[in-house]
Image: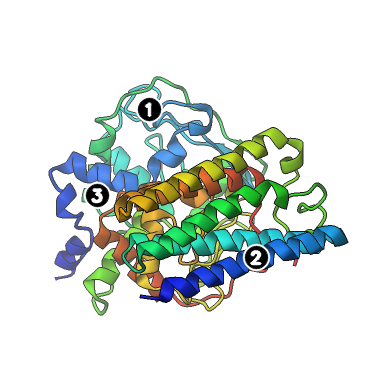
Amino acid sequence: MRLAFAGLIAATPAAAADGHVDRGAYLFKAAGCAVCHTDSEHGGPALAGGRALKTDYGTFYTPNISPDPIYGIGAWSDADFLKALRQGVSPDGSDYYPVFPYTAFTLLSDVDILDVKAFLFTQAPVPKPNRDHEIDFPFSVRWALIPWKILYFREGVFQGDPRRPLEWNRGAYLAKAVVHCGECHTPRNWLGALIKSQRYAGVVGGPDGMNAPDITPHPDALGSWSTEDIATLLKDGITPSGDFVGHGMRDVVADTAALTDSDRHAIAVYVKSVPPQPPPPKPGH
Amino acid sequence: METWRWKFSLAAATAVAAAVALMVSVRADDIAGIVANRQAAMKVLSANIKIVSDFTEGKTDTAAALAAATLLVATAKTVPSLFPPGTGMEALPGKSGARPEIWTKQAEFAGHAETLVTVTQTLLATVQTGDPAATREQLLLAGKDGCGSCHDAFRVKI
């Protein structure tokens, strides 16, 4: 029963269910993988990595995830790919920095992870070497990630809540495991771990200096928004007051626009259901 | 269906109030007033975008959308005048999100302002065809090229 339920939640829409590659393409887009793994700002080739992500801990350069066997992930087995997304561990056994949101992707089903791999392996290989991260001490010490993972990382596939409607569960799966909204919208503690009790409460001065607003149903946040308002924002990037979303979210909307209406609606149902949180104080006020 | 009339009146009144207040504040050389009026003008833009958006979703009629799109063009044309030097975020921290680059990269900024006029004019022309789907497409394009590109380069969120 539990398994059947989980299977329904992770069911990618029929429109995209022509095969594993198509399902993978749908999830890949929804998860926004290309946004980070392509250095669009400098015209870098698709999926070849190299985009700089400036954080409080230093600058990370995203790796090449094209199927190039030497510089990309072309030589990875299914087990390697599963381990990377489920456990945050590379094929050579080193831990990934959680700037790669495996803390979210660990929730994905095996089928979904392998469908993404199937799609990735249909893309053009790019022989472009990875650039080393420029991280400040002590975060530059990779083994420091071991206690971090013990403290903050919970490995395991998304477990739905059978007391909630199926649509809520599908929305929670998409928001948490796939679209990973919380990576930008949930505040972090001083060690960069998401504070789950403040889910979606908003972040001032997040990665690349961007602000991510409070998206909880608090009166000072999205309290007055309907489910349709949220779904419309995810489709068109337009708010109920006629504003358009800013740069970080525009990249996200370019991808959530490709979701089906029912998946966008499911995400909106879930976002409407999280506990209200007051927005963070704004600097200069 | 008379709702468009009061919507039009409301939007027009806001625009006129903003324009009048702007003239007063410029004369008074009041930075806070200039910033407040600039933000009021941006609100005029978003409020009328909302009306056009409602039209594309069948929530209001063509007449209302025409009035709103006309106001969008008119307001877009005032944008360059809303940014006198010395009225950015450094002059009024926490209140203004206008980046100093507006005045150091004037040609680029002026280019964005011209784009806003062009995209709102195209939007008006599309509304005149009465086609909600085409209007939606143009509206989103206006949001990206007209609003978004300038905000990305020249605005910080406050």
Q: Quick one: B47 or B10, which is closer to the camera?
A: B10
Q: Residues within 10 Å of mark 2 (few under 14, many from 20)?
A: few
The image's colouring method is rainbow
- The x, y position of residue B94, in whole percent, is 75, 61
In the displayed structure, A170 sits above or below A80; it is below
Quick one: SS at disc 3? helix
Indicate which label's residue lies in the foreground, 1 or 2: 2
Quick one: SS at disc 2? helix
Query: Residue at 46% across / 23% down in the picture?
Result: A129
- Res. A213 visible in picture: yes
Marks 1 and 2 belong to one chain: no
Query: Residue at 19% across / 57% down in the picture?
Result: A11
Query: Residue at 65% across / 65% down in the picture?
Result: B16
Amino acid of disc 3: Asp
Instruction: Say the numbered circle drawn on residue A112.
Output: 3
Amino acid of disc 1: Gly
Quick one: SS at disc 1? loop
Label 3 and label 2: CA atoms lie apart by 55 Å
Decide if residue A267 is on the left or right side of residue A36: left
Farthest residue to the right: give it.
B28
Label 1 and label 2: CA atoms lie apart by 59 Å
Q: Earlier in the sequence, mark 3 or mark 1?
A: 1
| Residue pointed to by mark 1 | A72
Label 3 and label 1: CA atoms lie apart by 20 Å
Instruction: Say the numbered circle drawn on residue B16.
Output: 2
